[in-house]
Amino acid sequence: MRPILEVKDLTVYYHTPAGPVRAVEGVTFSVHPQEWFGIVGESGSGKSTVALALLRLIKPPGRIERGQIVLDGRDLLAFDEEDMRNYRLAQIALVAQGAMNSLNPVKRVRDHFLLALRDHGVQLGEQEYDRIIATLLKRVGLRPEVAHLYPHELSGGMKQRVCIALAISLEPKVLVADEPTSALDVVVQWQVMETLRAVQREIGAAVILIGHDMGLIAQTVDRIAVMYAGRLVEVGPTREILTEPLHPYTRALIASLPSLDGRGELRGIAGLPPSLLNPPAGCAFHPRCPVAIDRCRMERPLLREVRPRRWVACHLVENGGTT
Ligand code: SF4
Ligand code: MG
């Protein structure tokens, strides 16, 4: 099956007076139609930058330095601004981190939908708009009356559902969800994830789910990509990564998950993620890596397919995945 999205060598820098912050470097992955693809990493690993870059929403001083973002056979980075504006929402949509706070406080929910639809050339009669908005709200488990409320009249969970309904209003082929449940309490988190699953089934989009919580992401996605210091360090099917993580950083992430016997022991990973202004030479993980060798300080490991569908960037993981 041809991938719906192919990201190749995506590289994004933020140009600061102190020099370029290498937020995303050489990121390559592909996503299949209707697939759930997870990107996991600590805060500052570059995952939100990937999300914004996929929609070409990087603002100065940030800049996409190079790469390709091929959506359904067309490279978004070759589009002019006007084409991109048409593609956004219609072909690829984002539920951004903290999206619920981006609703305009002086506009009713209905107006948010009208703006999105009209902006994409959907011209309808008032009743037809109302019918479509009611359908979209229903898809995320909200009643039609919600259309007439202002954002401050909604709970956090309801606001996030409105944002999901907005994101799917033109049935995009790819939905990017960046920490869609952060800042919500656990029960509401679960409901919002259920809502995402339900809308994905209905519109058949591929979903890129981004977050810092390996446990939460792993429950939902088919494949996981682990990001560290702006690069992908491991990509593979969720079940395989959980049962046999190959990269030392992935192993540490999984070891830090609360244990299954319910004692919830959380072992953090010693040390801090590196500065992306002056990333360490060689493997960026070497200052924290328990099994680093001399070579790791000098030579950067490339992401390689070490067994079918398993990609790992580590000098100690040879073909076949033995370390
Ligand atoms: Fe650790 Fe070296 Fe592998 Fe990096 S390349 S993860 S430092 S062993
Ligand atoms: Mg983020």
Image (spheres, rainbow, N blue to C red):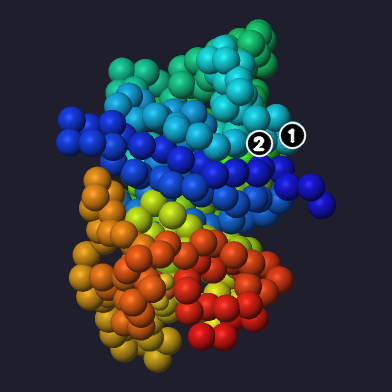
What secondary structure is found at the residue carrying circle 2?
strand
271 vs 5, left or right, is: left
At 46% from the left and 40% from the top, the residue drawn is 11
In this rendered view, identify the residue nearer to me: 252 or 21: 21
- In the image, which disc is placed on residue 42? none
Locate residue 280, reporting x and y percent: 28, 59
Locate residue 178, reporting x and y percent: 43, 46
The answer, for residue 191, to whether it is visible in the render is no
Label 2 crowd (10 A; few <14 / some 14-19 / many >=20): some
Label 1 near label 2: C-beta < 8 Å? yes
Q: CA distance from mark 2 to mark 1?
A: 6 Å
Label 1 crowd (10 A; few <14 / some 14-19 / many >=20): few
At 38% from the left and 73% from the top, the residue drawn is 295
- In the image, which disc is placed on residue 70? 2
At 54% from the left and 44% from the top, the residue drawn is 9
Residue under numbered circle 1? 73
At 17% from the left and 36% from the top, the residue drawn is 18
Q: Amino acid at mark 1?
A: Gly
Q: Above or below — where is 164 with respect to 186?
A: above
The answer, for residue 315, to whether it is visible in the render is yes
294 vs 239, left or right, is: left
Q: Amino acid at mark 2?
A: Val
What secondary structure is found at the residue carrying circle 1?
loop
